[in-house]
Image: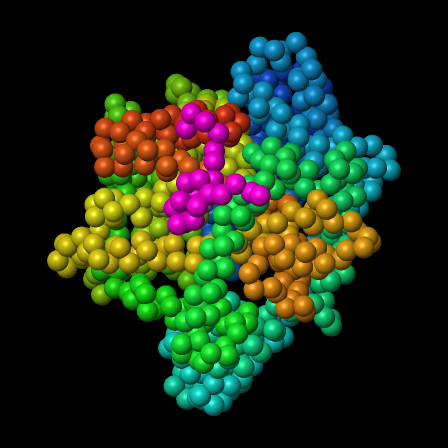
């Protein structure tokens, strides 16, 4: 055994606090290393539980250290799962994951730790504790409470039962959606039925057909197999000229998982009833209150007010969108055209094509990655006074395409670093884009001799790789995505909080965490910024103004309709967790229809069952939280307006406002309540005016 321990002493997963040696992580040794670590952490946990003084140093700091060791080891494994996946790695991950999860539960539900935290809050040390530390303790107590730690006897038993039942039902819910989606297909053999559809959809549909046994299927002559997966369903609804087929597909889509063996109707009712029961056990009136207890939004009424203000502002614009669409369709399809739900995406696309005729492909040559990075780093320096320099080779990476950068402040003092893994690698890398923390800023975890441990971020994108010796030419979407993730990265890296449990994005409320990311995205629509970061990869010419104007104008196309659709989802979600009474007069679908009366301009079909596939709230983390998208957008748009007010063209104003943004939103992270952080930046509470203005909508007061 001693020999094993010695071998493990040098294991890369156990070297927490250092830049990870990714290539030294041998999947075969992962379970052993994690189990060894869990053994050590369990012993530490028991030592804390067996009688610890309720003080910050004796209680919270050891918890931070423990969390960091596990977070580092398991974080590296999780990161590799995302960017360097393999069968061996997956096997190692699956074999040890249950042990990691049960250790996490064990700690979350530890009564002695909870009692000690409460004793700390009620003890003599509390009054002298710094505000950031108080906020950390409050969060730890609240999370433990929501994990049921404060319950005793029968209540605790029932609470745990409910957790199990909810986990099971969430799994069944999403399996039903997957299975019901997979159970439907429509095979077309007549080329006329595919009229209007783009080549990419024909290729996908022919490939679907081949996979289903039609060996000779081709994009040109079929057969084409349509499914309800969005990459197939979405383009068909936008482009297929056959109205009857669009109707058939649409009806199948909005009734997914609503009947037969994949029916989610009962599960929805059960989930809502279980959540309500759980909320009452925890001492809340309903699940919306539980959700909001850990959010920036103060209460349900505040969320409802925002949703209503936005609804009033977007409703007539959405009506106009529909009128315009109807008129456009009548000119081409005859005067008796009446819009139905399966017509909207189709005619909206025709108008878009006519009005903003440019393609994503036209934009790409202007956005080679090296130039975009130069522009992005230049913007960061102008706004926030940070200098970003390539430091490739100074840190081990997991792939040769991965870049490493160091970030310094105005005085040249290093403050952070990050990895950038830009390109798509379908064989081993998960899709999408994300920012994750590699190391968090912390004084407690500083190396001997250092004042603080500096933060390191992972920025992962999936953009077009370089082809034929050309640099990676980015689509406008890819540029926006990079800005978005970089915004998250800035909050992680520019934090000045030294408490590891509240630095960077740690301890930031869910409905506020997208503020810096969406804020940075906005700059992709700033002409000066775009001029600065676009350069045709052959001619060096920046993106022509005419093209920029089309991109900018297309941004607000159907903004009222898009906004209203999100409000329909958010309001339905909130009503189900706030007003719905299980077993009462209204079914969840009645609630949906009642909300739809005020939040749709083309009412859903009576048989519409979109709730049966609303995985965000029934199988994801967005229950009574779908509104968060809009809440954070209000913040990010209003933050941008702070820059607009000061003058985006004026370098000095830009720099002053940027420094204020850095010193508040980016620096304070989870150490201060987000409403206070926002006010410190903006000088007042957020308002939705800027969001509406940017969307081309006008604020109106609710009648
Ligand atoms: Zn984000």
Q: Is residue 686 magenta?
A: yes
Which is nearer the eye, 422 or 371? 371
Check the image and report above or below for 335 versus 160.
Answer: below
Query: Is 367 displayed left or right of 421 in the figure?
Result: left
Query: Is 646 displayed left or right of 92 in the figure?
Result: left
Give the percent coordinates (x, y) of residue 269. Answer: 76, 56
Give the percent coordinates (x, y) of residue 672. Answer: 51, 25
Q: Is residue 421 magenta?
A: no
Give the percent coordinates (x, y) of residue 680. Answer: 44, 24
Check the image and report above or below for 582 versus 305.
Answer: below
Check the image and report above or below for 205 versus 137.
Answer: below
Q: Which residues are magenta?
A: 682-703
| Residue 177 placement: quadrant | bottom right
Give the percent coordinates (x, y) of residue 427. Answer: 43, 63
Check the image and report above or below for 490 versus 346.
Answer: above
Which is nearer the eye, 158 or 398? 158
Task: Check the image and tell me how it is coloured.
Answer: rainbow
Q: At 45% across and 61% down in the image, what residue appears? A: 321
| Residue 511 placement: quadrant | top right
Q: At 47% across and 36% down in the image, what residue appears? A: 687
How many marks are shown on the rendered structure? 0
* Dominant secondary structure, magenta: loop
Q: Quadrant of the N terminus?
A: top right
């Amino acid at each position: 055994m001693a020999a094993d321990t010695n071998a493990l002493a040098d294991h890369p997963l156990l070297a927490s606090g250092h830049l990870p040696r990714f290539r030294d992580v041998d999947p075969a040794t992962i379970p052993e290393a994690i189990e060894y670590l869990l053994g050590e952490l369990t012993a530490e946990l028991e030592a804390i539980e067996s009688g610890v003084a309720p003080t910050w140093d004796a209680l919270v700091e050891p918890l931070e250290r423990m969390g960091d060791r596990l977070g580092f080891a398991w974080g590296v494994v999780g990161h590799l799962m995302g960017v360097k996946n393999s069968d061996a790695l997956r096997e190692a991950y699956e074999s040890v994951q249950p042990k990691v999860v049960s250790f996490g539960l064990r700690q979350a539900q530890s009564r002695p730790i909870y009692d000690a935290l409460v004793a700390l809050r009620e003890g003599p040390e509390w009054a002298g504790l710094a505000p950031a530390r108080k906020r950390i303790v409050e969060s730890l107590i609240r999370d433990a409470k929501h994990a049921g730690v404060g319950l005793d006897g029968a209540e605790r038993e029932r609470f745990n039962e409910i957790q199990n039942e909810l986990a099971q039902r969430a799994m069944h819910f999403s399996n039903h959606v997957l299975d019901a989606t997979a159970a439907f297909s429509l095979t077309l053999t007549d080329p006329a039925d595919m009229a209007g559809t783009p080549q990419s959809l024909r290729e996908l549909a022919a490939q679907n057909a081949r996979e289903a046994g039609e060996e000779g299927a081709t994009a040109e002559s079929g057969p084409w197999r349509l499914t309800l997966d969005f990459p197939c369903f979405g383009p068909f609804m936008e482009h297929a000229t056959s109205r009857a087929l669009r109707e058939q597909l649409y009806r199948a889509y909005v009734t997914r998982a609503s009947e037969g063996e994949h029916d989610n109707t009962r599960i929805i009712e059960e989930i809502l009833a279980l959540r309500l029961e759980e909320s009452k056990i925890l001492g809340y009136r309903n699940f919306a209150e539980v959700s909001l207890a850990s959010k920036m939004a103060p209460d349900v009424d505040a969320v409802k007010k925002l949703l209503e203000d936005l609804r009033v502002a977007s409703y007539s614009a959405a009506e106009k969108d529909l009128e315009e669409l109807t008129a456009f369709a009548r000119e081409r399809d005859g005067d008796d055209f009446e819009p139905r739900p399966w017509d909207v995406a189709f005619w909206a696309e025709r108008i878009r094509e006519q009005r903003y005729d440019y393609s994503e492909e036209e934009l790409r040559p202007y956005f080679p990655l090296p130039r975009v990075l130069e522009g992005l780093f230049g913007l960061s320096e102008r706004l926030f006074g940070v200098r970003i320099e390539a430091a490739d080779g100074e840190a081990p990476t997991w792939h040769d395409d991965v870049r490493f950068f160091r970030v310094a402040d105005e005085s040249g003092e290093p403050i952070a670093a990050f990895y950038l893994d830009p390109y798509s690698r379908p064989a081993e890398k998960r899709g999408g884009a994300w920012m994750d923390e590699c190391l968090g800023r912390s004084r407690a975890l500083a190396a001997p001799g250092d004042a603080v441990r500096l933060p390191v971020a992972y920025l992962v994108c999936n953009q077009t790789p370089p082809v034929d010796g050309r640099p990676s030419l980015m689509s406008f979407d890819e540029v926006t995505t990079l800005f978005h993730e970089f915004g998250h990265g800035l909050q992680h890296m520019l934090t000045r909080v030294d408490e590891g449990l509240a630095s960077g994005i740690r301890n930031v409320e869910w409905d506020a965490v997208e503020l810096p990311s969406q804020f940075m995205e906005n700059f992709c629509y700033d002409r000066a910024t775009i001029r600065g970061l676009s350069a045709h990869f052959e001619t060096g010419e920046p993106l022509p103004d005419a093209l920029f104007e089309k991109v900018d104008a297309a941004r607000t196309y159907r903004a009222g309709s898009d906004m209203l659709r999100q409000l329909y989802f958010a309001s339905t979600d909130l009503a189900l967790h706030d007003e719905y009474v299980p077993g009462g007069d209204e079914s969840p679908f009645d609630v949906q229809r009642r909300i739809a009366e005020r939040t749709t301009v083309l009412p859903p079909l009576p048989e519409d069952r979109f709730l049966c596939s609303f995985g965000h709230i029934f199988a994801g983390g967005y229950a009574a939280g779908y509104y968060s998208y809009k809440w954070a957008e209000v913040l990010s748009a209003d933050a941008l307006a702070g820059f607009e007010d000061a003058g985006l063209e004026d370098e000095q104003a830009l720099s002053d406002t940027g420094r204020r943004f850095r010193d508040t939103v980016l620096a304070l992270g989870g150490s201060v309540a987000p409403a206070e952080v926002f006010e410190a930046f903006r000088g007042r509470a957020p308002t939705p005016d800027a969001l509406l203005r940017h969307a081309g909508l006008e604020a109106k007061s609710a009648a």
